[in-house]
């Protein structure tokens, strides 16, 4: 086979490969890249749908955004939700994974039971939790009353609405985190535990010096995914609180929804979307720069 024939065959293989990838590229371009680019351009325009043509205002939307008390309240609520749900959810998931990472009868049933909330529709889950938090006939208040505590108006008071959503967020994300932690635990070589036991290590020392260091890649992955997901929370808030009471559960994505799809200020909504994108990107980079060097790979 001559060099020309080889190059011709390589070109044919290259074209065939891209022909198979073309549908995915087209899908991404039409439904991902173009909308993002269009939103970026639109963020420099003032446009109220059904109220005339767009007007170019440069950085006007961003100036208004960063001076808006509603925006900063939504930012605080977003960080409150993330800070309340991520560390607690990861800690509980790790404890459960450690308990399940041993020979148990019906282990597959336990894993399935923990993972079910993750694959259940979030709308359906939110409706169920609406009943759990019902002030009169809800399960949450029933359990509080059993131990002599007063009932709480979970979703009707600003001080309790966000904690109620945080509890739901922890519960729903628990199964996914448990499965990922289990995969990480099962990837740790057993001879490391055996060597540590020979040196006289107890359970806490095994966890501190063997398990936890080798779980840092898994924890790092879960942390990044959890941060991204928490900053994109919308469905449970829309179903359960609609951002109330008094804006106490209006996170940044719900604020975007209110501005773009309730008040139809598309330019301002696009500016919020760009700020959200930049915020998630910066947080991810910070996590990779700060925590990345501390991750121990085998």
Image: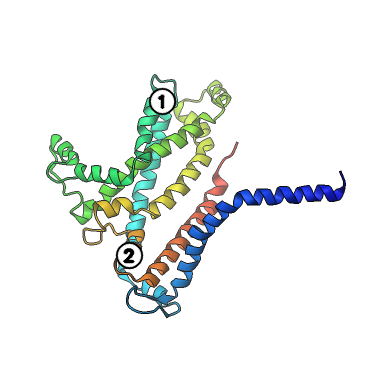
User: Which residue: 47% across, 49% down?
Assistant: 224
Mark 1 lies on residue? 108
**Structural crowding at the residue carrying mark 2, measured as other residues with C-alpha within 10 Å and reported as few (<14), some (14–19) or many (≥20):** few
Quarter-of-image position of residue 49: bottom left
Q: What is the spatial separation of the Cα atoms under label 2 and label 1, in whole angstroms?
A: 43 Å
243 vs 223, left or right, is left
Mark 2 lies on residue? 261
Residue 101 or 262: which is nearer the viewer?
Answer: 262
Quarter-of-image position of residue 119: top left
- Of helix, strand and loop, which one carries label 1? helix
Asked if 30 appears above or below 6 in the picture, the reply is below
Image location (x, y in percent) of residue 103? 44, 20
User: Which residue: 13% across, 44% down?
Assistant: 151
55 vs 235, left or right, is right
Quarter-of-image position of residue 125: top left
Identify the mark at residue 36; answer none if there is no mark: none
From the viewer's perspective, is the residue at label 2 or at label 1 nearer? 2
């Amino acid at each position: 086979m001559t060099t020309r024939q080889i190059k011709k065959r390589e070109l044919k293989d290259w074209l065939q490969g891209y022909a198979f990838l073309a549908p995915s590229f087209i899908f991404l371009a039409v439904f991902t890249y173009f909308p993002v680019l269009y939103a970026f351009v639109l963020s420099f325009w003032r446009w109220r749908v059904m109220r005339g043509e767009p007007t170019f205002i440069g950085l006007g939307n961003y100036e208004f955004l960063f001076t808006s008390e509603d925006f900063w309240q939504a930012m605080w609520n977003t960080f409150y939700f993330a800070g309340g749900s991520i560390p607690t959810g990861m800690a509980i998931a790790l404890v459960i994974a450690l308990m399940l990472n041993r020979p148990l009868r019906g282990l597959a049933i336990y894993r399935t039971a923990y993972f079910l909330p993750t694959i259940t529709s979030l709308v359906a889950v939110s409706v169920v939790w609406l009943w759990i938090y019902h002030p009169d006939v809800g399960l949450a208040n029933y359990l509080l009353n059993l131990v002599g505590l007063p009932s709480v108006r979970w979703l009707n008071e600003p001080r309790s609405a966000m904690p109620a959503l945080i509890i739901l967020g922890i519960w729903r994300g628990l199964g996914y985190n448990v499965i990922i932690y289990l995969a990480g635990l099962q990837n740790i070589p057993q001879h490391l535990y055996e060597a540590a036991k020979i040196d006289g290590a107890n359970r806490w020392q095994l966890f501190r010096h063997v398990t936890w260091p080798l779980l840092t890649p898994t924890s790092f992955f879960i942390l990044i995914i959890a941060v991204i997901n928490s900053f994109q929370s919308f469905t449970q808030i829309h179903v359960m609180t609609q951002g109330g009471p008094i804006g106490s559960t209006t996170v940044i994505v719900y604020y975007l929804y209110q501005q773009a799809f309730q008040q139809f200020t598309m330019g301002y909504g696009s500016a919020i979307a760009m700020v959200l994108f930049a915020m998630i990107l910066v947080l991810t980079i910070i996590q990779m720069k700060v925590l990345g060097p501390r991750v121990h790979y085998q």
